[in-house]
Amino acid sequence: MVETSALGIEIESISHAFNGSVTALADFSLRIAPREFVSIVGPSGCGKTTVLNLVAGLLPIQTGKIRLGTAPPQAGRHDVAYMLARDCLYPWLTARQNAELGCRIRQMPPEESTRRAAELIRSVGLEGFESALPKELSHGMRQRTALARTFALPSSILLMDEPFGALDAQTKLVLGELLDRLWEREQRTVLFITHDLAEAIALSDRVVVMSRRPGRIMADVAIDLPRPRSVRAMQKDPRFHEIYADVWSLLEQAMADDFDTGAA
């Protein structure tokens, strides 16, 4: 297990506009406790990725404030890792070398970088494919490699922007359960963006539902299902379906508002 200091995320009254005319977020506030897993769902274009980019320090804060622990966001912070929907693997590096890359960039000792990468490659089920190039891996295997690279970094906070969004349904289930096992083992603070409601409920302590643009929080739903979890096993749990119906109703309302107003 990678030991990380526990950092929470505090977002207070954030508003953000692009080009001075398109307001992505309006008075958005959210608190995430250390080691908590929180997912955000909402209509397309409601500002979900903007929230992640602000927390990562990739966008300037225009109004309001954000704190990661006691410090403001800053690009390149070593206690924050960011995983995208695309695997972003270097085609000339092997799976192990790609998994190790973040540690190398952060100038960790080579022995430690190699150990972390090897451990995570095994954890994501890629043992035997350490020397494979990305072109020799399936899409799901490439995302496993990207997941190994993310967890190899000893970062307290993980920001994940639809990391399984481009995968087929079966592979999404497998990788979602893999992510749940890794989180159970290491207890990072996770802010997760997804369009998949079942995925959000299965993984999260809380699911935050956003309104259409400009994005605000419509609801913050506690997920009172026991851990560890499996999406496949939870299909038989009536409570899972109750939560799904409740959150879907909120999301449906947000999407209906989207269509009624012609918002993108």
Image (cartoon, rainbow, N blue to C red):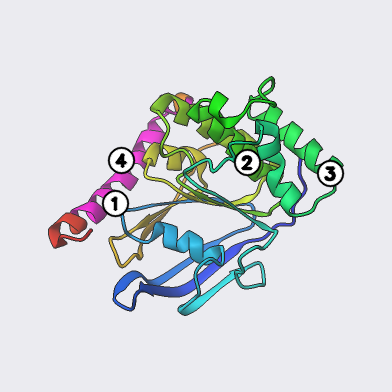
Residue 13 placement, left or right of 10: left
Q: Is residue 66 magenta?
A: no
Q: CA distance from mark 1 to mark 4?
A: 9 Å
Decide which of tag 3 and tag 2 comes sooner along the chain: 3
Look at label 4 and name its amino acid. Answer: Ala
Query: Marks 1 and 2: in contact by CB < 8 Å?
Result: no
Q: Residue at x 79, y 38 (%)?
A: 114
Q: Residue at x 65, y 63 (%)?
A: 76
The amino acid type, in three-letter code, at marker 1 is: Leu
Q: Nearer the viewer, mark 4 or mark 2?
A: 2
- Residue 255: x percent and y percent? 23, 52
| Residue bearing mark 3 | 110
- Residue 207 seen from this side: yes
Q: Amino acid at mark 2?
A: Trp
Q: Chief secondary structure of the magenta span?
A: helix
In the displayed structure, would residue 8 be above or below residue 180?
A: below
Regarding mark 2 in the picture, which secondary structure is present there? helix
Q: Which residues are magenta?
A: 233-256
Using the image as rendered, state which of residue 232 and residue 109 is in the foreground.
Answer: 109
Q: Which residue is mark 1?
A: 250
128 displayed left or right of 85: right
**236 vs 1, nearest the viewer:** 1
Q: Quadrant of residue 261?
A: bottom left
Q: Earlier in the sequence, mark 1 or mark 4?
A: 4
Q: Earlier in the sequence, mark 3 or mark 4?
A: 3
In the figure, residue 7 lies in which quadrant?
A: bottom right
CB under 8 Å between callouts 3 and 2? no
Which mark identifies residue 245? Answer: 4
